[in-house]
Amino acid sequence: MQTASTNICERMGRSQELREFERGTVIGCHLCNKSIHEISLLLNISQSTVSGIITKWKHLGTTATQPQSERGQHMLKRTVCRNHQLSAESIQ
């Protein structure tokens, strides 16, 4: 018999994010006064991920994934800085 924590561990990779239910479970544990370490062990999620979810929930009031609008601007800025002699057409 597999537990929920085993399922999370098997599914998770470095670039995958938790489902809304799993993030809600982290918040539920936090509201039950579980420590970050306890939540991490219980759900088999890294402590940094648990801490990030709780921090985001405290600041934004939600655990939903936010759009990454700044990512494109950051990548464009890096490209321009590295290749400042390229034309706008070639960068695009």
Image: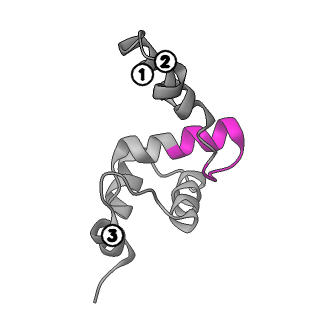
Secondary structure of the residue carrying tag 2 is loop
**Mark on residue 87?**
2
Residue type beneath disc 1: Thr
Depth order, front residue of 70/66:
70
Residue 42 rendering spot, x and y as whole percentages = 36, 62
Alpha carbon separation for disc pair 3 and 1? 34 Å
Say which residue label 1 marks. 79
Residue 58 colored magenta? yes
90 over 11 or under it: above or below: above
Percent across and percent down for residue 2 are 30, 84
**Magenta range:** 53-65
Nearer to me, 89 or 19:
89
Q: Compared with residue 22, is residue 58 higher up or lower down, i.e. above or below? A: above
**Is label 1 or label 2 in front?**
2
Give the residue type that dot 3 points to: Arg
Task: Tell me the crowding category of disc 1: few under 14, some 14 to 19, or many 20 or more residues within 10 angstroms, Cα based.
Answer: few
| Residue tagged 3 | 11
Q: Earlier in the sequence, mark 2 or mark 3?
A: 3
Q: Is residue 56 left or right of residue 46?
A: right
